Image: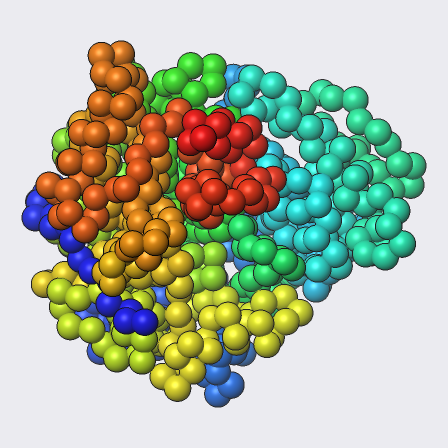
Amino acid sequence: MSSQIDHLLDENRRFAPSAEFAAQANGTAELYERAAADREGFWADQARELLHWHTPFTEVLDWSNPPFAKWFGDGELSVAYNCLDRHVEAGNGDRVAILFEGEPGDTRRITYAELTAEVKKAANMLESLGIGQGDRVAIYLPMIPEAVIAMLACARVGAIHSVVFGGFSADSLRSRLDDAAARLVITADGGYRKGKVSPLKPAVDQALADRGTGAQETVEHVVVVRRGGNDVAWTEDRDLWWHDLLDQASAEHEARPFPAENPLYILYTSGTTGKPKGVVHTSGGYLTQAVFTNKYILDIHPDTDVFWCTADIGWVTGHTYVAYGPLALGATQVMYEGTPETPQPGRWWDIVQKYGVTILYTAPTAIRSFMKQGRQIPQQYDLSTLRLLGSVGEPINPEAWIWYRDIIGGGKTPIVDTWWQTETGATMIAPMPGVTSTKPGSAQVPLPGISVDVVDEQGNRVENGNGGLLVVTEPWPSMLRGVWGDPERFTETYWAKFADQGYYFAGDGARKDEDGDIWLLGRVDDVMNVSGHRLSTTEIESALVAHEATAEAAVVGAKDDTTGEAVVAFVILKESYLAVHTPEGLATQLRVWVSEQIGPIARPRDIYIVGELPKTRSGKIMRRLLRDVADGREVGDTTTLADTAVMSIISAQVK
């Protein structure tokens, strides 16, 4: 099968950075020149400039045993010291590190000095429970400061943390505990979600129930944070209260260094079938690229900015752009526990206004959900402090990009659309604000020191104007170091397709425009083959959302006797349009609209008007479930959905 993905949509709007923004931006064109002249030397400079090394490295990259990389391998550092102690020692202990907002409205302002003291106590707690270098600790917590404290405490003692998203079931938690052979679980009685306390401890108890083998044999203790005030079942000698242990712990703890390749965390990729895949990230290279991207792509100025990444710490975005990158940079950041619409639809904008947020980094799914509600909600708030907006998680369609810039950014705020993955550890492709003229919907250019390309099935570079498979052609500092306990799976999953060239294959389709800028086309698995044309679901979704009545759309391919596959769309309409139009009439309009925007080949065979789409709690649309519906199959596993009832409603609507 040809890897060429047909390009159907054109986007010609351009937005150059203002002279005012460029003048204050951290990033400059010189970074690209330095990296092009000496890529490894460039990353060595970044590692030395951005981090404190207890033992300076002399070797930059060891690629003698590909695909197993070592960056700064003979150096030693403490990730926790870089995120905490060094800021206090530099006289910035009074700077606020975390502005926490709980869903019920409770708040905490935690300075760097206070956060450092808490992490020191938590590190002493871990050591009192026998946890040390190389031990695995599972963290199953809501979006509260204790989650970040637990992560940094693990880093401080050299333990490897595995954060499990609080929305995952007991079975999902059990499989991750088993695979990592965790010795300790840190959880909470519950966390607030949509106005109620969502319990967590019962899922841990269920995951650790006696099964004869597995997690209950390795897990020695369960430490419980009191958050929701729920009564919880208690197992004597195993279960311990977080606050009791911290009250007893000393606030003195020296951050000792570990080798740069000491594993920092395991993060299991979501949505996989069969055994979960534990992506391993180490310390020195990961932290280098994490800090670099926070400084130069998100343009954080620690002295003046208030940064807010809305991701949960259960996902990699919450690791790199909440727990590690901003804190290593010494930034002040907002951390919010709840959902965007609790207790009212404008909660996020209330938080931006309340804390004077200057940089907002969120997902296209969230942006489209705000579009559905209407611009009148954010326009009730003062969002004038925002100076930079970021997008992460999936390709952003141009209309959502424009809405984000105009309605949230006041028509002037630059947008950085970032492409990266759990496996890459940090941003790989993004415009650099202050340098790049942005294009709505395009991630555009690889970072300085990052080498990516778009190739065909044989690994040959495609020319500008064409599409194919996105690959990373050279090792990068924050790259994954393997799949936990399964080196063969690591090689087979990510490197086998282009083994001869040594390329990392991301699993995404992309195209290069006439300027050579990169446009993501979604997962290759989501590409449809309609009458011999390989069509990107992303572009058809983008066309649908460009219609003024559409808030959100998901497109899948369904089996078709005539065309092989047919385009099937599931569309959420804006509330204002549902009041004056019938769903049937709008569906007909949308079929014609797509045909006009793209061409008859992309006209959806079926358009289903739905009230919601199946999403994980991180906001990712589960298209495989929609494919099940479109093909008339029984709907697959829905346990990772934010609302498991959604698929029953969609299935009924389709029937």
User: Could you tell me residue 364's position as x and y percent?
Assistant: 33, 39
* Depth order, front residue of 46/408: 408
The reply to whether residue 276 is in sight is yes
Residue at x 31% of width, y 66% of height: 470
Horizontally, residue 530 falls left or right of residue 61, namely left
Horizontally, residue 483 falls left or right of residue 515, namely right
User: Could you tell me residue 235's position as x and y percent?
Assistant: 89, 36
User: Could you tell me residue 637's position as x and y percent?
Assistant: 59, 44
* Depth order, front residue of 431/150: 431
Residue at x 84% of width, y 29% of height: 233
Residue at x 84% of width, y 43% of height: 209
Of all residues shown, which one is farthest toward the front?
561
User: Could you tell me residue 399's position as x and y percent?
Assistant: 19, 37
Horizontally, residue 53 falls left or right of residue 5, namely right
Q: Is residue 223 above or below residue 370?
A: below
Residue at x 28% of width, y 29% of height: 551
Of all residues shown, which one is farthest toward the right?
236
The image quarter containing residue 454 is bottom left
